Amino acid sequence: MMELIEKSGPVFYPLALCSLIAVAVTIERIIALRPSRVLPRQIIDVVEAIQPGKDLSLALEICRRNPGVLCDSM
């Protein structure tokens, strides 16, 4: 393996660095965008319980308390 790295010359090091950065960004995005953070259970419960034309003030209050992807459009 080391022989192959030595033969690749100086091109290997920037490619290896870019690969490590890509893996780090991927892991960070997986952690940051996990479903429990994007859609908190409290908001899902409220949205499922809302009846058309009713409880709109409750939904708005929950969204004010929990800013996020689902509540930004309200």
Image: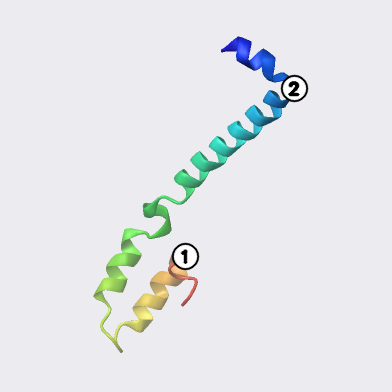
Q: Residue furthest top?
A: 3
- In the displayed structure, does residue 16 sit left or right of residue 61? right
Which residue sits furthest right?
Answer: 10
Residue 62 location (% of width, % of height): 39, 70
- The Cα–Cα distance between marks 1 and 2, rounded to whole angstroms, is 43 Å
Q: Quadrant of residue 60?
A: bottom left
Query: Depth check: 51 or 25 in front?
Result: 25
Q: Residue at x 55, y 36 (%)?
A: 24
Q: Residue 20, position in %: x, y?
A: 59, 31
The residue depicted at 49 percent of the width and 39 percent of the height is: 27
Residue at left offset 45%, top offset 51%: 33
Q: Name the kind of residue labelled 2 in the image.
A: Pro
Q: If the image is split into quadrants, where does the N terminus sit? A: top right
Q: Which mark is residue 10?
A: 2
Instruction: Say which element carries label 1.
Output: loop
**Image location (x, y in percent) of residue 31:** 45, 44
For numbered disc 2, what is the local secondary structure?
helix
Name the spot of residue 12 as percent of width and height, x first. 68, 24
> Which of the two discs, 1 and 2, labels the residue nearer the N terminus?
2
Which numbered marker is on residue 69?
A: 1
Colour logic: rainbow
- How packed mark 2 is, by other alpha carbons closer than 10 Å (few <14, some 14-19, many 20 or more), is few
Q: Nearer the viewer, mark 1 or mark 2?
A: 2
Query: Residue 4's mark?
Result: none
Q: Is residue 71 above or below residue 12?
A: below
